[in-house]
Amino acid sequence: MAARGFIELLRLADYGRQRQQGGQENENTRWSGIAFSFAGYQFVAPLGEVAEVIPVPSSTTVPSAKSWIRGLANVRGRLLPLTDLAIFLSLPETELSKLSKVMIIDQPSNYGGVIVDQVMGIQHFNKQSYFSSSSQLPDALAQYASGYFERQGQQWHVFLFSKLIQDQAYLNASA
């Protein structure tokens, strides 16, 4: 809840700064999201789909869980299931490093953390640089993506956590 408030404050601060700079037109042509990478690809998630980003916490393994469940972590008194999205999608396992982060999804029907290689913060894209499909992503990833933005020759795929948390295979974590 507090994280949503913080993200909203960031959005309002950015909106106020644009209005002061005469950026009303810019607001209509710009799309913003949280940029991250995993499995060698660059992604951006809509701001409303990620509640919080935290360093990878210590966790306890879950007996009889699928291999992509990394464990349970206590985050401010709530049990946070940690998942390795790469393993879930049959891609090489995420190697934890100092840059690894957990993106927390906090929806009424689902609370969980997805481990990614790196989070690059909030990124802004020109809506005109959006393309609705991409042949660069493997099918396992493409099912959760919705097009991409292109910036400086690089594709930033739009990853929808809302699609992921509706996938019955993802919701069924027991082995």
Image (tube, rainbow, N blue to C red):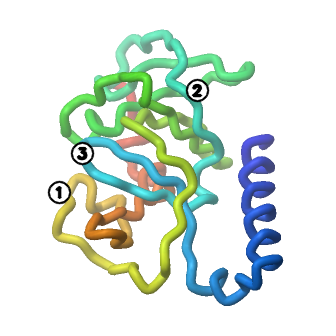
Q: Position of residue 158 (x, y in %)?
A: 41, 64
Q: Look at label 2 and name its amino acid.
A: Leu
Is residue 145 or residue 15 the one in the foreground?
A: 15
Q: Give the number of marks.
A: 3
Q: Secondary structure at mark 2?
A: strand
Residue placed at 35% from the left, 63% from the top? 157
Distance from disc 3 to disc 2, alpha carbons, whole Å, reads: 25 Å
Q: Secondary structure at mark 1?
A: loop
Q: Which residue in the protein does label 1 denote? A: 138
Q: Look at label 3 and name its amino acid.
A: Gly
- Quarter of the image containing the C terminus? top left
| Image depth: mark 3 or mark 2 in front | 3
| Image depth: mark 1 or mark 2 in front | 1
Residue placed at 36% from the left, 32% from the top? 84
Q: Position of residue 1 (x, y in %)?
A: 78, 43
Q: Which mark is residue 80?
A: 2
